[in-house]
Image (cartoon, helix red, strand yellow):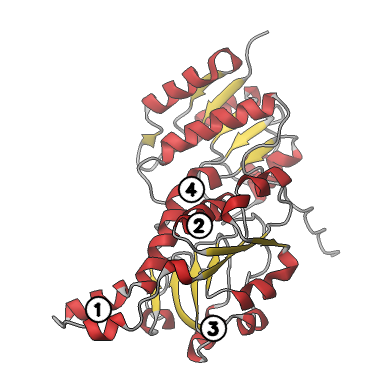
Amino acid sequence: MSAPLLLVAVFNEAQRWALPEAHVDRLREGLGDSARVEQVRTRAALLDRLDEAAMLMGLPLSESQLQGRGGSLRFVQLVSPYAESLAPIRRVIDLGARVAGTAPIRAVPVAEHAIALLLTLTRGVDRAVLAQTSHRWASAEIAGGCRDLADLTVGIVGLGEIGRAIARRLAAFGCEVLATRRPGATPDEEDDDAASIARLLPAESLDELLGRSGVVILADDTPGRDRPLLDRALFESLSPGALLINVASGTAFRENELLLALRRGRVGAAALDALDHRPLPPNSSLWNTPNVLITPSVAAASPSAWRRAVDVTIENIARLRADRPLRDEIVLAPAEPAAAP
């Protein structure tokens, strides 16, 4: 019997780009005789071979393109964000495939970006840059607002793979780290970083975490989350003047509710890489709001992204063969039934 077929479907037809051959060779080397690895460079070629494939790296297909296809799929490793539509993922899960998300690919750069945003706020780097544009030596103005990370309690909302990477880095700075679990988290996930986290709370205790934390980092990357992480009532639970960092997937809050919390002083400053509207419209009030720092959704940018994508694909195929949980395995809640006509 021949080894199962892994199709590498990582490409951009418009730009005539596909995953470099060196990475495909690493996949072949890492998987050995356990899989046949073939690369496709167009959607037409992918659809032509899809029914033969047991595994996919990449899922550049719509739900309609999957109709009547993919019945042999048993594993899909995503390599790009899935926030825009979960329909193709739900479709392949319904076909019997197990699907792994992108958190292991993104965790290192997103964690480092979250720390960079936090240090920018606590050390006044944002204010120093503004002062520099007007050639102003603002040491007295900036020094009074500087804070030491070692003196801070930081709450991480959503302790998935990205949240755990953030927790490890915060612990190295001497922060007291609190966190809320993600729904469906497995015990081995939580135990991996127990030394980094002073207290791990259930998701239902988010208001307690918010009230105890001088810094709140939104890091939840749960797919299919259908409501914001923070609503108006939860903003009121924040410790007055708290710093807010957002690198979460999906909608984290409503813009108007954040603006209200900033005006009322409930949020002292906010650093935002993840935003509900991307790109942020030029007329958004966030652009000109004091104490708001915006980076244009670059937290996951990394020259090592494809190396990590190959590594996690190899690891997850080994886990699949051993019938073990996948890293960042996606489990979706049942779809809402269609409304009666």
Kindly report the distance in space between the C-alpha atoms of the residues bearing marks 4 and 3.
Answer: 29 Å
Q: Amino acid at mark 2?
A: Ala
Q: Are marks 4 and 3 in contact (CB under 8 Å)?
A: no
Of callouts 2 and 1, the N-terminal one: 1
Judging by the rendered image, the residue that carries numbered circle 3 is 256
Where residue 16 appears, x then y in whole percent?
A: 35, 37
Q: Are marks 4 and 2 in contact (CB under 8 Å)?
A: no
Q: As rendered, which of 164 and 285 lies closer to the eye?
A: 164
Q: Amino acid at mark 4?
A: Arg
Kindly report the distance in space between the C-alpha atoms of the residues bearing marks 2 and 1.
Answer: 30 Å
Judging by the rendered image, the residue that carries numbered circle 4 is 106
- Image quarter of residue 336: bottom right
Where residue 7 appears, x then y in whole percent?
A: 55, 26
Residue drawn at (56%, 39%), measured in percent from left and top? 59
Q: Are marks 2 and 1 in contact (CB under 8 Å)?
A: no
Number of numbered markers: 4
Say whether residue 210 is visible: yes
Kindly report the distance in space between the C-alpha atoms of the residues bearing marks 3 and 1.
Answer: 25 Å
Q: Nearer the viewer, mark 3 or mark 1?
A: 1
